[in-house]
Image (tube, rainbow, N blue to C red):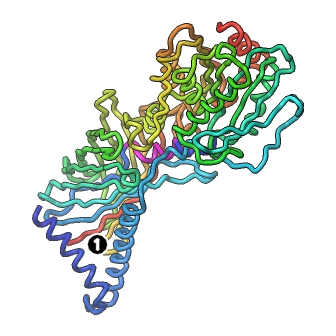
Amino acid sequence: MKYFFQFLILLFSLFSIHCGITQPVRPTEEGTTEVIASLGGPIAPVGGIVFPIPYLNVGAMYGYKPNLTVYGNAHITALLFKDVGLDGGFSTRVLPEKSVRPEITLNGRFYFFWDAFRGNTTRLYPTGTLTASYLVGERSLIYFGADNLYQFTTSDLFVSPFVGYGFPISDGMMMQVESKWMAMNHDTRHGVFEGAASVGGKGNVGLFFGIQYSVK
Amino acid sequence: MKNLIKNIRTFLKNQKRCHSDPDLSGEESRFYIQKKETRFLATLEMTIVIFLFSGCFDLDSSLFNNDKLTSYNLSTSVIPESLRTQVVLLSDGKKIYGYFVQSSNTNEKNIILYNHGNRDHLQFYWDRVELFYKMGFNVFIYDYQGYGMSEGEPTEAGIYSDATAAYEYVKSRGFGNNSIAVYGFSLGGAPAVYLAANVFSPKVLITESAFASSSALVQSGTLLDIPNTYVMKGEYNNAERIKQVTAPYLLLHGVDDKFVDLEKNGRVIFRNANDPKKLITVSGAGHSDLPEKMGELNYLSTVKNFVLTGQ
């Protein structure tokens, strides 16, 4: 079933739950524009090698107010299949970091998919994310939290906890590495990832890499 | 928002200047970093452009694992060479290959028309032919376009055309509709159900580890309610097509099938099927080991009895 297995892996990577890294971890500076990109997806064995399936998003975020960042992404991998994949949302600071308390950020986002050239159907998934982050040194961030994606047609909630690390690689550029347990509350025991990256038959683990580049 | 657009424009403008004017920053180290960043972003942009213009894909071809052969090398340990005949048929103008296997009982009137799975050619599935031979039936197995020695490339429409050509051949050998049992394994469930729904009413229809539709496959893979049209052209809609089948129907499915989940596929097809119908689920069986997990003797007697009696 070699190809059949890869077929299912491809499917999962194309529309995996929460198909991107957590960006922004914290609201960005007011008036600042950052180009962002995210690459990664579920960890899966293909051809005997286990690696994260590459799902590519690119977009931008903008510090609209001191406490409010808006952003949008285009899903490049989906475009390969003539599907329009977009997401957009906002991020706002709920609590600033203080002593041992991490900064708490609330992130609201909509994922939108449209198979414009085949079935002409659309899908919309709202997502809410709470992220806790600590500043390490001057500019690095350690963060953790959970995505919560809602599917209207089946009234399902997909919970995906994550942990990540963001660090500067130059003056204007930050890199992020993040691991996410995607759809941890859903059974994948009989699914593609059992024995590969599911945890106890639930969801599957993904690995993501992100880049933020400050335009200003 | 005006600032956002302005910033992006400035960025793109500066990027061009970086490429053309190495003295732009005045500080070599800063310029070096900026140049690296610019290169990175230029590469990213180029990657996006390549993605956008490299054409568009679908996953239909990923369903097929169609190794080609220049000749078949079939085992003779169970079926003597004298009882098998290689057959060349025409489907959509392409040559497709098959084998007719004569029952050891010359009075046997029934034949199994076997539609194999997505993996490999008929040689790979020869052990299944041997099982049907052991039941005492005549058997016909064929390769879809692009499989084994068959010409062309596999497509959904192609496998339906191939199955129809196989049926026409079986009929031409004197087998009436009420002596043809159609059997489909996995992907082969699609042409099997197609034959029984759209081409003729067979004596019985049997599917093993068949999927409900490409939508069911996509949704099993993504966990989301993504329609099949997002990634595939093919429908393979066995769950809908089975509604038109009036022949007695036996559905076999492994409880532990990780590729084609029983609940979202087998049970869905079975729910939509007309009576008379029979469902056999096998604990411990995966996608392709159902006969072994069921026990060969049990499998042989179950299938044989269903072909003979429809029960």
Q: Main secondary structure of the magenta part?
A: helix
Return the x and y of residue B130 as percentages of the image width and height: 80, 27
Q: Which residue is rendered at x = 31% and y = 85% of the image?
A: B19
- The reply, left or right, for residue A60 in relation to residue B183 is left
Q: Is residue B283 visible?
A: yes
Res. A26 image quadrant = bottom left
Return the residue at label 1.
Answer: A172
Q: Which residue is rendered at x = 44% and y = 42% of the image?
A: B232
Return the x and y of residue A195 as percentages of the image width and height: 59, 39
Say what secondary structure mark 1 lies in.
loop
Give the quarter of the figure containing the N terminus of chain A.
top right
Q: Which residue is rendered at x = 48% and y = 23% of the image?
A: B241
Return the x and y of residue A122 as percentages of the image width and height: 28, 40
Res. B288 image quadrant = top right
Return the x and y of residue A111 as percentages of the image width and height: 28, 44
User: Which portion, as a residue range, is magenta?
Assistant: A8-17
* Mark 1 crowd level (few <14, some 14–19, many ≥20, 10 Å Cα): some
- The reply, left or right, for residue B261 in relation to residue A177 is right
The amino acid marked with disc number 1 is Gly
- The reply, left or right, for residue B229 in relation to residue B127 is left
Check the residue under mark 1 and report the chain it is in.
A
Considering depth in this image, is B76 or B4 the residue closer to the camera?
A: B76
Give the quarter of the figure containing the C terminus of chain A.
bottom left
Q: How many marks?
A: 1
Res. B110 image quadrant = top right
Question: Does A25 sit above or below residue B139?
Answer: below
Considering depth in this image, is A164 or A21 the residue closer to the camera?
A: A21
- Magenta stretch contains residue A9: yes
Question: Does B254 sit above or below residue B35?
Answer: above
Question: Does B166 sit above or below residue A59?
Answer: above
- Magenta stretch contains residue A168: no
Q: Is residue A5 visible?
A: no
